[in-house]
Amino acid sequence: MSRYDVAIIGGGINGVGIARDLSIRGFKVILFEKEDFGWATTWSSSCMVHGGARYIIHDIGVTYKSSRDAGILTKIVPYMLSRRPFIVVTSSKFMATLFDIYMSVYDLFSRMRGAVRHMRLTQDEVSYMTAGEVLAKGGGVLTEEYTVDPQRLALVNAISAQEFGAKVLNHTEVIRVERKDGSFLISAKNPLYNSEIKVESKLVINAAGPWIDKVISNSIVGTDQKKKKRLRPTKGIHIVFPGKILNSVISFQAIDGRYLLFVPLEDRTILGTTDDDFFGDPDDIEILRDEVEYLLHSAEKFIKNIRSFKPYSTKVGLRPTPYVYGVNEDKITREFEIEDEDGIIHVLGGKLASFRLLSEIVSDFVSQKLGIKTQCKTHILPLPGADDIDERFDGDFEAYSENIKKKIKDEFSLDDQIAYLLTKKYGIRARELLKTFGLGELICYCSKVFEGEIKWAIKREFAETIDDISRRTWACDGFCNGILCMRKVQKILEAEGKNPDHKNFVLRREKLLYPVKKYNEELWNEFENFKKKVL
Ligand SMILES: Cc1cc2nc3c(=O)[nH]c(=O)nc-3n(C[C@H](O)[C@H](O)[C@H](O)COP(=O)(O)OP(=O)(O)OC[C@H]3O[C@@H](n4cnc5c(N)ncnc54)[C@H](O)[C@@H]3O)c2cc1C
């Protein structure tokens, strides 16, 4: 049986971040992910690597940590970040003045992220910056934040962990953890290959996000803590629209006074998020049409044509926030906590923006427990795709990305937009992708994905299924929901000896499309016809 220093349960952003940090420090690590890296809460996020302006009053530590770590990300994964103007729009001048003062405090943190100071905007200036789409009676306040593809961020951490010697397994669920002679025996199963794996490890890290309590109650043998509640998860949904509708992120007040976001990404725009207590099974989360209406109803006060942009999907996830009684869900701390249950280390809470710091603190704790002095290097070692960065890099992440784009555009005679998208996804490794597999046939029209990328995802990025391909390349994840490209992806998977089964993929897409059916009947009908044909 293979022996490890640390076994990690969960390949969300926190699990893969910890796996990377520990492997760089020289520990022997194994990571188990029951589905795919970053497929759960990490995917469902608003994709903001932000400085956490909203936490200044209740949770200033979160603002500090998020801002500091966002600054570090611009240096270790520069190609993946996109700078976005961030406009808080208001319905009265009084509110705009309050935000103006508030953002003056935030400016103190902005420097850590390399972002500019905030500016107050008049109603006309907001209108000008948003091509007349956004109404802001009281004007607005402009600052800067970054967006990222959270699933690819998780993936490159998993790849890096592997490159530093970790064993990282997706589609492998931990089903049993038992203590034996001072260490742990861990059993896991992989339903795709119908296989089981048993390993021994000195420590176990439970980084299962919203499943933390479920892992304790279902898989840990002999614990007397099964009844203790560690989490108070809150559910958040987003609506997904095709295309980059605006250039700026818009933050505005919802009908109940909370703040929502309208976030442009590379090939889509998302509107969210709700924040509601969730008491069910994390494996069974529904999006209610009512929640979709809450978002649209709130948005239409500020974003003029919101109901005319046809949504094509939704996202949903649970924040793995620590248990607390007696406060509203949106006031639960976004700080992270570590709890050591005699060698099983539970990692609760956190933010996408500060996963690296969380990983550093957990890895320091592990080093201490194992009695080995180590040093964190994740703040200086670039992630895969930024391999050519050295200590001379000045942190100008936009110039860095532009340079890669230009390089691959010239070397492989690419269209500007294709070179841009390849840079965003693969950084400097796009060169190796193109040299090894070429671009090949255009597979996905919605998100401009090519055959070479699908092969790369299978050969170099642990992709096993259609869903895995969609997370890595964005094929089958655009406006058509796979109607136009699923078959082509299946053929490549089959040719590469992988499981081309499409049932799970089709049912998952349907589940995400259903809540916005009412707002895009045409797409829904197309999808149902497609489903009848293929299932
Ligand atoms: C709606 C929403 C919006 C958000 N927006 C932002 C944002 O814009 N910026 C930001 O900084 N943060 C944001 N967050 C917070 C951030 O997304 C989370 O803090 C972060 O993704 C949590 O990552 P995680 O690794 O703990 O959990 P997850 O990503 O859920 O990972 C846990 C993993 O454990 C795996 N697992 C569970 N059980 C087992 C088992 N038995 N065996 C093996 N694997 C198992 C699961 O499959 C899962 O992949 C948002 C959160 C939500 C819900």
Image: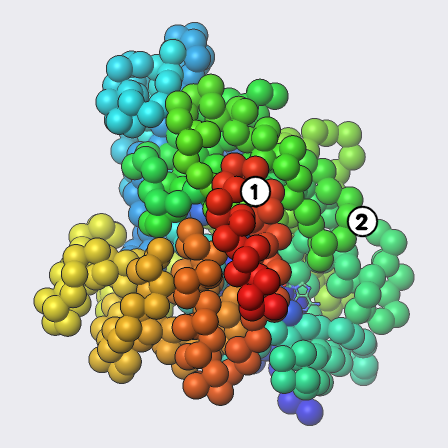
- Where disc 1 sits, the SS reads helix
Residue 241 pos. (x, y %) = 43, 42
Residue 314 pos. (x, y %) = 54, 46
User: Is residue 175 depicted above or below 336 in this figure?
Assistant: below
Say which label, 1 or 2, has the lower sequence index: 2
Residue 194 is labelled as: none
- Where disc 2 sits, the SS reads loop
Q: Which residue is mark 2?
A: 229
Quarter of the image with the C terminus in it? bottom right
Q: Which residue is mark 1?
A: 517
Pick the residue in front: 203 or 157: 157
Q: Amino acid at mark 1?
A: Lys
The answer to whether any part of residue 100 appears in the image is: no
Quarter of the image with the N terminus in it? bottom right
Q: Are marks 1 and 2 in contact (CB under 8 Å)?
A: no
Residue 483 pos. (x, y %) = 46, 60
Tell me the residue at 43%/55% (across/down).
480
The answer to whether any part of residue 87 appears in the image is: yes
How many angstroms separate mark 1 from mark 2 (CA)?
A: 36 Å
When asked about the image quadrant of residue 18, the answer is: bottom right
Label 1 or label 2, whichever lies nearer to me, is 1
